[in-house]
Image (cartoon, rainbow, N blue to C red):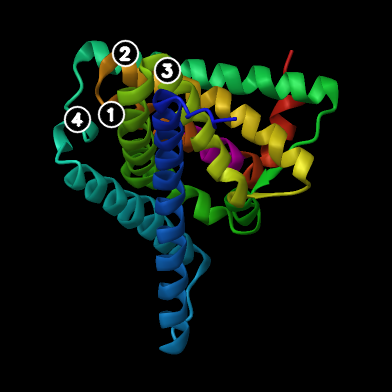
Amino acid sequence: MARTALDPTITARARTVVLALGIGLGGLAFGYALTLTAALAFQFAGVSLTPSSSIVLSVVLLQGVAFGSVAFAYARYRDAAERFITFHVPSLRELALAFGGWVGALAALIVIGIVLQSTGAPTASNQIANYGLEHPEVLLLLIPLSFLLVGPGEELLFRGVVQGTLRERFGAVPAVLIASLIFASVHFTSLSGALAGRVVTIAALFVISLFLGALYEYTENLTVPALVHGAYNATQFLVLYVSIEYSDQLQNAAAFLG
């Protein structure tokens, strides 16, 4: 019996998904390699990094250098920088959408937290958050870095390039879904805890990522999801810092509430 040839459309779609996943993992691997190389270089030079400088170095090399380099290299390879790198000065309408997206993402986070707590579902913890619990001053640095590097770098790679590549083959809605799944999944390495907890946390990140992907498709401006992403992360770092540094004062203040 003759073998049935694969549908070229299915094959092409599978290749596009693999390519998109490879871009995301490639940026992550490149960033980790740069961070490890820099850490070894400092160690070899006898330079001891403080917790704050370690975090800054990691963010700069990963979200800044690595994600940016991979995104620009791919856009140049495709000769389509204007299609994948779409940062523009936001209009007032886009700023309003960014504000709404930030509020919506935080509301979704609260709802997800309530659902997970009520069902007793396991969750994982973020390694940077764990680091911040031991060194709260690092959280203050992460607030501006969320706007300057984390939001722009991750949105450039995962929304601009990954989602943009998927859109060419699948269209907008499937591209948002697949890119969000890739974005959430690559956070596996930054989580700590049991496998079940990591999977649940990745599922929650997938929901938040849908907000970012939908905003990008609607505005076609990477600045909008980058602002939402940065504000979303910065808000969590700020809340965590306040809860650590002022927990006693907050408890005392709560005693006087109505």
Earlier along the polypeptide chain: callout 4 or callout 3?
Answer: 4
Along the line of sight, the residue nearer the viewer: 60 or 68: 68
The magenta stretch is 235-242
Residue 231: tell me if it is visible: no
Earlier along the polypeptide chain: callout 4 or callout 2?
Answer: 4
Q: What residue does disc 3 label?
A: 101
Tell me the amino acid under the disc marked 2. Answer: Tyr
Cα distance in 3D space between marks 3 and 2: 12 Å
Q: Quadrant of the C terminus?
A: top right
Mark 1 or 4: in front is 4
Position of 258 relative to 116 (above/below): above
Q: What residue does disc 4 label?
A: 83
- Image position, residue 5 (x, y; %): 47, 29
Tell me the amino acid under the disc marked 4. Answer: Arg
Cα distance in 3D space between marks 4 and 2: 15 Å
Cα distance in 3D space between marks 1 and 2: 10 Å
Mark 3 or 2: in front is 2
Indicate whether residue 240 is drawn in magenta: yes
Q: What residue does disc 2 label?
A: 218
Q: What residue does disc 1 label?
A: 222
Cα distance in 3D space between marks 3 and 1: 13 Å
